[in-house]
Amino acid sequence: MSDHEFRDFYYHASTIFNNDYHVEAADLFRVSSADDQYPPSYMSFTDCLHSSMDQYGSLEKASGLSPSSSEVFSPAKHEHVGVNSGEVMAITPNSSISSSSSEAAGTCEEDSENNKNKQPEESPKKGSKTAKKKDERKQKEPRFAFVTKTEVDQLEDGYRWRKYGQKAVKNSPFPRSYYRCTTQKCPVKKRVERSYQDPSTVITTYEGQHNHLLPTSLRGNAAALLQPSMFLSPPPQLAGTTTFPHELFVQMAPHDMNSQAGAAVSSMLAENPFQQHYQHQVSDNGLLQDMVPSRFLKHEP
DNA sequence: CGGTTTTGACCAGCGC
DNA sequence: GCGCTGGTCAAAACCG
């Protein structure tokens, strides 16, 4: 991020969070390791902003992370973004969301196309296959998890999805639904499940990156808010015009995170641009309580 | 009739 | 090796 961009962004963020949403910026960012083996740690908003893409090494140290294994602590590891009624924003790794499925492990583009050919290409050489799978897993698509306080299971996010599976989740009375973007060759998937810890919230996990714009049929506000220009140009001087913190993420996405964040944020944003009580938090597998400063969590009486 | 949803089966990874 | 679990497939059902 350039200094110019930083100033724009920081001013923007300050306006949003301090003035409109009364958030303590120092609590906004959470940085964690790539695989969640390490306890979460928090860094200040400004620290995070000042940390350029090539400073993740020092970031690790600052946040008590270990650059262990072969994982490179890249921006892509910080992709999860959540906004909680303008109260909470956090960044977490994609990491722990299951390392089980090889399908989910590989790059999505490969997945979606290869799955259909999987059977014919089946090789008897299990060893090499396993090695290949491990390689694929290293390159798995970043994921973004959101928690949305809503009674609706299937949230509108501006994209068209086709459900391709539903599974019961261990320890949860609520099933998990699997969706794929219906746009041709778009590798994006999402999983939707209701949190068993708080049934009033829905956990949505996005995986992959849309390779297309929002469907032209996208209606109303979501489309307007998600104009491609917002992703492609530096943040304009919008101080005073921005209302929702979502917009901040939309704008910061291409600069401070990978484009995945933009996609995820756009999805989050489009879910319900007018929602008054949405509660987005970062989550992997619903482990919210560990991921957001406790005072930000709403505790039911 | 084409697209979507449902749902049982299948597969791979992981822990024991 | 076996069982458990998560993720995906694919045929059938459903729907506009």
Image: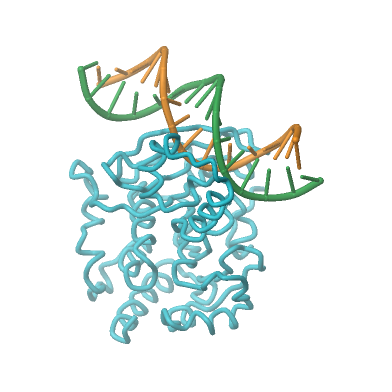
Chain colours: A cyan, B green, C orange
Q: Position of residue C7 (x, y in %)?
A: 51, 42
**Is A180 above or below relative to A249?**
above
When the figure is inspected, residue A59 is found, relative to residue A35, above or below; the finding is: below
Judge whether residue A249 can be spotted in this image: yes
Quadrant (top left, top right, bottom left, bottom right) of the N terminus of chain A: bottom left
Report the residue that reaches farthest toward the front.
Answer: A125
Q: Residue at x 34, y 61 (%)?
A: A262
Q: Quadrant of residue C14?
A: top left
- Residue A200 location in percent, x, y? 55, 41
Q: Residue at x 34, y 46 (%)?
A: A157
Which residue is pictured at 47% across the width and 49% down the height? A205
The x, y position of residue A19, in whole percent, is 40, 72
A117 relative to A98, above or below: above
**Residue drawn at (58%, 50%) of the image:** A127
Q: Nearer the viewer, residue A181 or A6?
A: A181
Which of the pair A221/A4 is nearer the observer? Answer: A4
- Tell me residue A139's x, y (percent): 46, 60
Query: Relative to the observer, which residue lies in front, A149 or A29?
Result: A29
Q: Can I make out residue A152 in this image?
A: no
